[in-house]
Structure formats: C-alpha cells, structure tokens
Image (tube, rainbow, N blue to C red):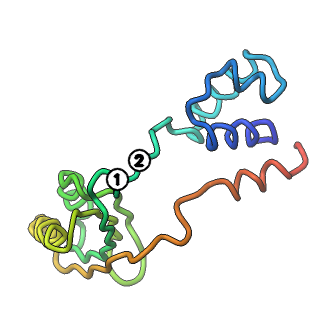
Amino acid sequence: MDELDARLLLLLTDEPRLGVLECSRRLGVARGTVQARLDRLVERGVLAGFPPALDLGAMGYGLTAFAVVEIAQGRRAEVCEGLAAIPEVCEVHATTGQGDLFVRMVARSNADLQRVVDHVVDVPHVRRLSTSIALSTPVPPRVRPLLERVKGRPPR
C-alpha cells in the first residue's frame, strides 16, 4: 500500500458514497488509476466492501455488551456457527487468555440482553459466559490513524 492508496482509502472512509470519477477528481489522478487501485485493494483483501455505517442505537439497539465465552475443547467452529445464527451477535473473535471467544452483542434493553445471553448460553458446547455492558464508546472503531501513518510514509 502506498500514499495514493492511503489517500484514496481516507477519502472513502470520510465519504463512502463517492464515485470513482469524483475520487479521481479530488485526488488529481485519472479515473482508470482510481479504478485500478480499488480493484487491486479488493483483490488483496485490504478493501473488504462498502457497508453503510449504521447507528445501532438509532435502530433500537442502544445497549452493547461484550462476552468472554468458554467453550468445549475442539468445538470452536460449531460454537461460532451457533453464535452467527443469533442476529444480535455482531462479531466474534477467537482469543488467547481468559476464555476462548470474545463476542460483541447488542440488545434493546437489559431484559433483551438477558434474552440474547440465554440464546448464547443455549448454543451447544458453550460452557460458560461472562458479560460486560458497555457504558460508552470513547474511541469508536477506526482505521484513520493507520491510513494517516501510511499516507505519511515515503513511497517504496
């Protein structure tokens, strides 16, 4: 990834609805250059898609919780499949340390979180669950600092 890739990704991070032509105009490069860069970033797996940024709170899911999940040994794939079937489970990470999986989930209320937790506990091979409720998100998910670092790096 070079400075132009970083500038392109920063532009799309700030304004994901921009078209290729407008990106090329703002970056001062040919439309074909932008398209080729996007194609290469997708091919390399750097750019995984253009999902909309959603405010889950505005959708009625104002409560975010994180759970450390302990599972039966050798059953990660089955447990992850079961967790993926629960709509309120937003992401799952296999981890080292305490527990086996780290799960981010959302709910509409504390009572709704109990319902979601009950679904998680009911997934076959889940042995134990420890849940924490997020009170706020002082640093939301971000990639800008990483892209800024690449942008400032001299071209290779």
Residue 129 location in percent, x, y?
22, 79
Which residue in the structure is indicated by mark 2? 54
Residue 3 in picture, x, y percent from top left:
81, 42
Q: Residue furthest right?
A: 154
How packed is label 1: few (under 14 Cα within 10 Å), some, or many (20 or more)?
A: few
Screen quadrant of the C terminus: top right
- Position of the N terminus, as image quadrant, is top right
Seen in the picture, residue 15 relative to 40 is either above or below; the reply is below
Point out residue 119 in the picture as x, y percentages from the top left corner: 12, 65
Horizontal placement of 85 versus 32: left or right? left
Nearer to us in this view, 97 or 60: 60
- The disc label shown at residue 24, or none: none
At x 31%, y 63%, the residue is 62
Mark 2 nearby-residue class (10 Å; few <14, some 14–19, many ≥20): few
Where disc 2 sits, the SS reads: loop
**Nearer the viewer's eye, disc 2 or disc 1?**
1
* Structural distance between the alpha carbons of marks 2 and 1: 8 Å
Q: Report the label total.
A: 2
Q: Secondary structure at mark 1?
A: loop
The residue under the point 71% across, 26% down is 23
Q: Identify the residue shown where x is 25% and y is 77%.
A: 70
Q: Is residue 1 above or below residue 83?
A: above
Is 18 or 117 nearer to us in this picture?
A: 18
Circle 2: residue type: Leu
Q: Find out whether the residues at labels 2 and 1 contact each other: C-beta distance under 8 Å.
A: yes
Residue ID for mark 1:
58
Q: Quadrant of residue 71?
A: bottom left
Q: Indicate left or right for 110 with 14 as reference.
A: left
